[in-house]
Structures are given as C-alpha cells and as structure tokens.
Amino acid sequence: MVQVVTQLNWKLIGLAAVLLPVLVSLGFWQLERADQKREILSKLEQQQSQPPVLLADLNTPSRYHPVTLQGHFDNNHYFLLDNRVHKGRPGYEVLVPFRDQSGATVLVNRGWVEAPLYRDQLPAVEAIDVRLTMNGTIYSPLEQPKTFPVSAAGWPKVIQTVEMDQLAQQLGKPLESYTVRLAEYQPGSLVIDWPAVNVQPEKHTAYAVQWFAMALALLVLTFLSQIRRSTKNNKTENHAGSVNEQ
C-alpha cells in the first residue's frame, strides 16, 4: 500500500516565497527590454530612411537622424574611448571635435582603431587637415553615462565614457549635446561598425523564457519536496498478521 504523507518544510517554503517573485520579475523585465529594443530598431529604420540634413538646418536633433557635416577637424585635441571591442580585438573609438560651418562644434566618432600591444602605448590616428563634407548619424546614449576622471595632461586623452559636459570642459569650449557617428566610407572614417543594440530582442525573449522556466521549476520542486511517500508491502503486512494470529 502506498501512502502519501505531506510534511511542510517552512524554511524551504519561505525560501521559495522569496525567490519566486524575483524570478518572475526578472522574466517580465527581460520582456520589457525586448520591447525597448524593438522600439529602438524601429526608430532607427525610420530615421535612416530619411535623407541627410545639414547640421545648420537641423532644428531638433534626434537619435539616429542622418546629418551632413561641413568643416574641419581639430586634430590637436581628440579622445580615445577605451574598452571598445571589434571582432574580439580590443581597441578604442576615436572622437574628434569638428568645427562645422554652422558655427557649432560637434564631437565626431570616426570609428574604431585597434589598441597597441601594451597599455602604455596609444594608437596612431591619421590626421585629416583639409575641409571636409561628411555624412553620419546623430547619437546620444539612452541613459546618462557615469563620470570617470580624465587625465589632465596631454593629448589624446583616454576616456571611459562620453560625458559631454566633462569633455567640453577638457576642450575649453562648448560642445553639442550629442556625437555624430560617421557613416562607412566617409572621409576620415576608420573601422565603422555601429550595432543598433547590444542585445537583440529575440535574445531578451529567450532570457525571459529561462527566468519563467526557473520559476516554474522552483514551484514544482518546492511542492514535491513537501510530499513523502511511504510504501508498505501488503504481503509483508499480511504475513506479519498471520504470524501474530498464530
């Protein structure tokens, strides 16, 4: 005969009560991130379908809007954005102030360069001294970047984040509140690879499924752990009963 006996393990139940809402909330958070990434990709597609606009004619700069710059680079002062990886190789993104004919100074991201073998060495970046006409897209981060100290001595300066007020202070002149990422094959462009999002929406959805699966597994295991099955052999019981009768 099989008997099912329920034994409540309150410690395990308490642990599950804490972990279950966390796992479920992480799943919904990943679904929310997937929706955000889809919105970014949709906006990018809409913006990139528009023709480039001269910076002087740009009334309201919006993320990913194509623009045309006309002017000169300030080759004596530029920044190297650290910890940029391209195809598994470490490097920097090169951000150079550009004096546009509109009178604005905008920080132009020329693209990626590979880092030298040793950290105390900086990559050589070719200077472009002539007047240029270039196409690119406006870029600004979705969240305010953290501020890290910037070395006060010498140029170029290695930076960890693009915090515009801090960089403007280093340059000693105002900068536009956004950067312009050069398009591929433009004058002055380096290695151009601008992923719209670092994680695709489908991957966020897969992560959400994993969190929900873990929540379900926790729920099932917690339930099963509260149940103890005791099996008694009917023949043994009958035999024991016969012996007792004798």
Image: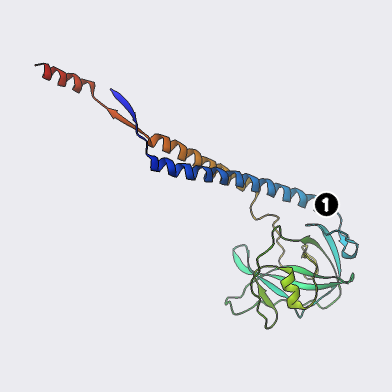
Q: Is residue 221 above or below residue 45?
A: above
Which residue corresponds to the image point at 53% horizontal and 46% vertical from the top-left? 22
Q: Quadrant of the N terminus?
A: top left
Location of residue 97 in the rendering, given as x and y in whole percent from the top left corner:
78, 73
Label 1 crowd bin: few (<14), some (14–19), many (20+), radius 10 Å: few
Secondary structure beneath label 1: loop
Q: Nearer the viewer, residue 222 or 236?
A: 222
The answer to whether residue 148 is left or right of residue 225 is right
Location of residue 45 in the rendering, given as x and y in whole percent from the top left corner:
78, 50
Q: Amino acid at mark 1?
A: Ser
Q: Residue 225 sits in which quadrant?
A: top left
Q: Is residue 118 above or below residue 47?
A: below
The answer to whether residue 165 is left or right of residue 89 is right
Q: Quadrant of the C terminus?
A: top left
Q: Residue 16 sits in which quadrant?
A: top left
Q: How is the image coloured?
A: rainbow
Q: Nearer the viewer, residue 21 or 75?
A: 21
Q: Is residue 126 visible?
A: no
Q: Is residue 11 visible?
A: yes
Give the residue number, with chain letter if any, for mark 1: 49
Which residue corresponds to the image point at 55% horizontal and 42% vertical from the top-left? 24
Which residue corresponds to the image point at 72% horizontal and 72% vertical from the top-left? 166
The answer to whether residue 128 is left or right of residue 156 is right
Which residue corresponds to the image point at 61% horizontal and 47% vertical from the top-left? 29
Q: Nearer the viewer, residue 141 or 126?
A: 141
Location of residue 141 in the rendering, given as x and y in whole percent from the top left corner:
71, 60
Residue at far left of view: 246
